[in-house]
Image (tube, rainbow, N blue to C red):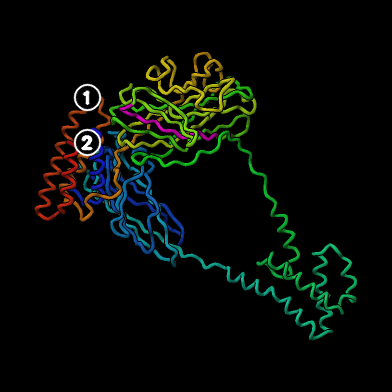
């Protein structure tokens, strides 16, 4: 079944660059929503919505966005606001100014309906003069959740008024700065006319009196006038004041240094308590990387004494059927809450959970070099909970009971498209704990299946059970992890594993495109099959679809509608699937 998943993942990519489909009874309307204006040199976001009506559930779409590449470029394409299409779509840009986007969902068979937000496109605007630019939208294909085409389709693009960038006023400020060199001209004028210079130093002497702390120089103006050294001293003083206030008029130079000194005082930063060093970012696995998942829950009413430890642990389960070998990751994990009016943000170590057919016993260890929890689970084991990641946090002050809104966030990802991850967390309090994660003896799975053959839950710190007390989400006694929060489920859609389509030398014929789309939705339903008989029936239907694709591919090759390389690639995939 894993081969079939990979095969269709490659076929999905083909669907990004295909043509339209024959008309059906239902209608849909796609709309590109843009802001009215945008600033040159900046970015803006346009949303793609598809209205499929109230009786049809959207299963998949493929569309093309066209734009003027001299004015706009696409910086990013993200999923829409609708949960079923919140994952990042598949994209490719065959020519400048034309970008294909496509996605399909396996979360629900009865939704989404109505107006569905499927994508958000971030455009970068070139640094150009004011203009109005149009962005086109065309829908290549739509399918409902039963693999039936949705047609006819209408699509509406949008236009954006670009405001040209305003010239910077730096040159004007520079000319003002140049003007401030006027005092040097005054110093040159002093040797020429001695009588005139008597008034100029008097004015200049009034300025240093406010700048310098010695005010005795102002009354003895007659003594200073004959001496040219005084004039020489004033000129450097003026020049040194000018660089600090390049944008100011020379008369206000004496006031500017004082203002600059006061404004350089920094405000005191907000105190945030963090317990562990931030873990370095890790590359998540490509096949499924949805938006970060957050679960918020509350602590019970038991107060937590100072210097006690809160053991935060999270677990996951992946109900089958699943591939024989795959990995789930948790990255960028944080816990945040407020206790006694003080905010806390805790960085949790990243983690990987690997399901391996070669493993016979579940294990959990902490890699101190990479600062990562690593759990390995036998693929043949039951579908119970597996430990993901955990953190021991020593309480710095007495915590009150009943702390609300404790939120754990994790970026889940997997290399197995089509799986469904169920994730939750718990917290218990201990009077003694270890700063070394490997000395905790963390249990990797529920029940048996590891070196800890007992009924304790995954995430139990087996070596410190005798120190557990009530607090956080636990009641002490034999509750070693605390009660679990609610569960969040993350579906990994069958997104393509290749970034570039196999058949890049031209569009596919509509009949071939239609078979690819229907086979894609069939295999998308495979992870939801709960019985072996259902899986076998889906397998048979998928194989018939794939064989039909090969027959059509060879026919299209003989008629010169696709290249021999494209036909061979499709045939090779079906052979591998068998």
Give how far across and how far down residue 531 sits, in percent. Answer: 23, 24
Q: Which of the 4 quarters of the picture holds residue 538?
A: top left
Relative horizontal placement of residue 203, taking residue 128 as reference (left or right): right
Vertical order, 495 against 382 (above or below): below
Report if the CB atoms under discs 1 and 2 are less than 8 Å apart: no
User: Which label is found at residue 532?
Assistant: 1
Q: Earlier in the sequence, mark 1 or mark 2?
A: 2
Q: Position of residue 248 (x, y in %)?
A: 68, 67
Q: Quadrant of the N terminus?
A: top left
From the top left corner, tell me how far across and down residue 366 is, in percent.
47, 30
**Residue 172 covered by magenta stretch:** no
Report helix, strand or loop for mark 1. helix
**Residue found 19% across the figure and 25% down from its top:** 533
Residue sticking out furthest to the bottom: 192
The tag on residue 522 is 2
Q: Nearer the viewer, residue 362 or 100?
A: 362
How would you classify the magenta stretch by its main secondary structure? strand
Badge 2 element:
helix
Q: Is residue 135 left or right of residue 512?
A: right
Mark nearest the camera among 1 and 2 is 1
Badge 1: few (under 14), some or many (20 or more) residues near its Cα, within 10 Å? few
Q: Which portion, as a residue range, is magenta? A: 346-358
Q: Which mark is residue 54?
A: none
């Amino acid at each position: 079944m894993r081969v079939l998943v990979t095969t269709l993942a490659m076929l999905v990519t083909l669907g990004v660059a295909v043509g339209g489909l024959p008309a059906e009874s239902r209608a849909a309307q796609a709309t590109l929503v843009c802001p009215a204006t945008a600033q040159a040199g900046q970015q803006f976001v346009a949303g793609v919505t598809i209205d499929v009506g109230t009786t049809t559930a959207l299963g998949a779409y493929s569309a093309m966005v066209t734009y003027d590449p001299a004015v706009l470029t696409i910086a990013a394409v993200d999923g829409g606001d609708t949960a079923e299409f919140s994952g990042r779509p598949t994209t490719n840009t065959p020519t400048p100014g034309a970008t294909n986007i496509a996605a399909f969902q396996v979360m629900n068979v009865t939704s989404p309906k109505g107006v569905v937000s499927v994508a958000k496109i971030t455009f970068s605007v070139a640094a150009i003069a004011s203009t109005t630019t149009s962005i086109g939208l065309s829908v290549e294909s739509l399918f409902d959740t039963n693999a039936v085409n949705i047609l006819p389709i209408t699509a509406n693009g949008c236009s954006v008024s670009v405001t040209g960038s305003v010239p910077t006023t730096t040159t004007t400020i520079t000319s003002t700065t140049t003007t401030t060199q006027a005092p040097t001209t005054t110093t040159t004028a002093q040797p020429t006319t001695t009588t005139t210079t008597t008034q100029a130093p008097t004015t200049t002497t009034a300025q240093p009196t406010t700048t310098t702390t010695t005010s005795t120089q102002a009354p003895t103006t007659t003594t200073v006038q004959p001496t040219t050294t005084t004039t020489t001293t004033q000129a450097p003083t003026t020049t040194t004041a000018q660089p600090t206030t390049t944008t100011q008029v020379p008369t206000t130079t004496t006031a500017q240094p004082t203002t600059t000194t006061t404004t350089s005082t920094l405000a005191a930063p907000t105190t945030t308590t963090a317990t562990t060093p931030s873990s370095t970012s890790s590359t998540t696995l490509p096949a499924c990387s949805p938006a970060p998942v957050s679960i918020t829950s509350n602590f019970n009413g038991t107060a937590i004494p100072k210097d006690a430890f809160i053991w935060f642990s999270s677990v996951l389960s992946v109900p089958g059927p699943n591939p024989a070998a795959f990995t789930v990751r948790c990255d960028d994990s944080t816990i945040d809450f407020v206790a006694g009016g003080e905010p806390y943000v805790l960085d949790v170590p990243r983690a990987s959970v690997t399901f391996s057919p070669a493993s016979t016993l579940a294990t959990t260890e902490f890699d101190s070099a990479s600062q990562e929890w690593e759990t390995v689970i036998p693929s043949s084991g039951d579908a119970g909970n597996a430990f993901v990641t955990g953190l021991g946090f020593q309480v710095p002050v007495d915590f009150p009971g009943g702390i609300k809104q404790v939120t754990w966030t994790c970026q889940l990802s997997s290399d197995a498209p089509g799986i469904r991850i169920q994730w939750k967390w718990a917290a218990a309090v201990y009077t003694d704990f270890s700063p070394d994660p490997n000395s905790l003896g963390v249990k990797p799975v529920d029940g048996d299946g590891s070196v800890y053959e007992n009924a304790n839950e995954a995430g139990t710190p087996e070596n410190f059970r005798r120190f557990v007390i009530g607090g956080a989400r636990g009641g002490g006694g034999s509750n070693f992890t605390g009660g679990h929060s609610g569960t969040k489920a993350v579906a990994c859609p069958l997104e393509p594993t290749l970034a570039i389509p196999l058949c890049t030398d031209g569009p596919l014929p509509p009949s071939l495109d239609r078979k690819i789309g229907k086979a894609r939705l069939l295999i998308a339903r495979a992870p939801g099959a709960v019985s072996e008989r259902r899986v076998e029936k889906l397998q048979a239907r998928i194989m018939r679809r794939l064989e039909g694709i090969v027959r059509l591919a060879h026919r299209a090759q003989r008629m010169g509608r696709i290249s021999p390389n494209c036909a061979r690639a499709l045939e090779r995939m079906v052979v591998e699937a068998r």
